[in-house]
Structures are given as structure tokens and as C-alpha cells.
Image (cartoon, helix red, strand yellow):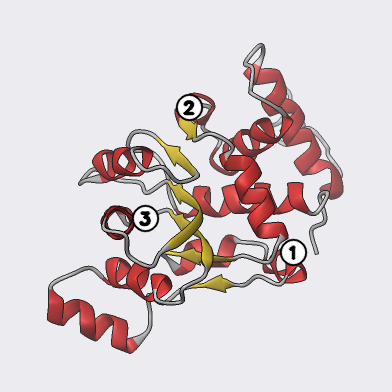
Amino acid sequence: MTSKLEQLTFVKPADIEARSFEIIGEELGNTTFPDAHHESVVKRVIHTSADFDYAKNLVFSHDAVAHGIKALAGGTSIVTDTKMAAAGINKSVLGSFGGEVLNFISDADVAAEARERGLTRSAVCMERAAALGEPLVFAIGNAPTALVQLYQMISEGAMVKPALIIGVPVGFVNVVESKELILDLDVPSIVARGRKGGSNVAASICNALLYIASNDRRE
């Protein structure tokens, strides 16, 4: 009888990612994408999540991928709603373009203001980011309240300048609705329709765009 260890396929560590993407391509079969860059984003999300539903539920606004690549290559910083998303983004590549990852969720004054105003810390973080007055990529993987706050500020003409909104929070309360709000805006966006998403998905979309912009540089 063949042991479970003997059933494993030997793959060199350096080749694991490449083989993974080959498998993803095989399982996607005849699925088509607008272009190679869209395909790269979707495949990296599937690679991160092992969930092929993202081939259907990732929604791209017109030229969102191109806007994201151009912004990041131009040194635009990324704002995240969680430390987990921030941790997953390739800061070396982002930094090589002049950008940085910004996250205000642990700032003591953010927590204090959120309590005082009866808001979530994520919502206050979006206001802090908007106050910077510069173009930003927003990568939201956990908090629908962050997307709602962005929607309200943009709709009201506040000083928020999204070069791209990545709206992929996961969960059950106001998650679906908050994503649909972003899709109603006239701003570049990549949204995971439905309940699925997560900080890892937000980070993987950022990394996909960074790797395209850097010709697949990783450091």
C-alpha cells in the first residue's frame, strides 16, 4: 500500500508558486478575462484563498487595474483597515516606488475618537487617511464600516482622493451592502461581490498590482 507521504508530489521550494499557478490555470479551464493583468489579479486571489469563486465574484470598474498599477508605480501609498492586511503587502516593492503602507487602527487617538463619536475605529481611520489630502489606494478586507465611510465622504465631496478602492470585507453584517455602495461610485474599484473576502484577499490584490507594476520583482 502506498503511504500518504509517497503520494506527495515533490516540488522544489522555488517552484511551488509557479506550479500552484499552473494548477489554477488548469482548473479555470476556458474561463476568460478582459486581459492578462485582470487574469493575474484573479489568479493571485485564488492562490491566496484556494477559492475559485473569485473568478466570478471579483468585479472591476472600468480601467481599475490600469489605475491601480499606475498609482502604485507612481508612489501612491496604500491605506488598510487592518494590521493583517498591512502585514501581507509587499512593502519592499511598494517602497521601491516611493509608497508606504498606512494603518491607523492602533492609534490611541483613533480609538478614543471612535468611542466618543460612537463609530468604529475603521471608519475614523478612513477620515484620518482622507485628511492627508493625497491620492491613496484603499485596501479594505475586514470592515464594511470603512467602505461606508468612504462612500459617504466621496458622495459628500470630502477631501478623499482614492486612486483605487479595493473593497473585499468578509462577513455577514452590512458586508454585501457596503460593497454595492462602492460599486455605485464613479471611482476605480475592485470589489468582491457577496460575503467573501478578507484581509488576505485585500493584500493579495495589492501584491498582484505591485508585481505587475514591477515586472514581477519581489524584493
Mark found first going from the N terminus, 2 or 1: 2
Q: Give the crowd class for mark 3: few <14, some 14-19, many >=20 residues within 10 Å.
A: many
User: Residue 12 versus residue 161: which sits nearer the camera?
Assistant: 161
Mark found first going from the N terminus, 1 or 3: 1
Q: Give the crowd class for mark 1: few <14, some 14-19, many >=20 residues within 10 Å.
A: many
Left/right placement of residue 46 relative to residue 186 reads right
**Which numbered dot is residue 16?**
none
In 3D space, how far apart are the residues under numbered discs 1 and 3 (Cα atoms)? 24 Å
Say whether residue 87 is visible.
yes
**Residue 98, located in which quarter of the rendered image?**
bottom right
Left/right placement of residue 28 relative to residue 155 reads right
For label 3, the SS is loop
Q: Give the crowd class for mark 2: few <14, some 14-19, many >=20 residues within 10 Å.
A: few
Judge depth for marks 2 and 1 and give the one in front.
Answer: 1
Q: What is the three-letter code of the residue carrying label 1?
A: Val
Mark found first going from the N terminus, 3 or 2: 2
Q: Residue at x 70, y 62 (%)?
A: 74
Q: Quadrant of the N terminus?
A: top right
Q: What is the three-letter code of the residue carrying label 2?
A: Asp
Say whether residue 8 is visible.
no
Q: Is residue 153 above or below residue 30?
A: below
Disc 2: which residue: 53
Disc 3: which residue: 142
Q: What is the three-letter code of the residue carrying label 3?
A: Asn
Q: Residue at x 49, y 24 (%)?
A: 56
Is the Cβ of the residue at disc 1 closer than 8 Å to that at disc 3?
A: no
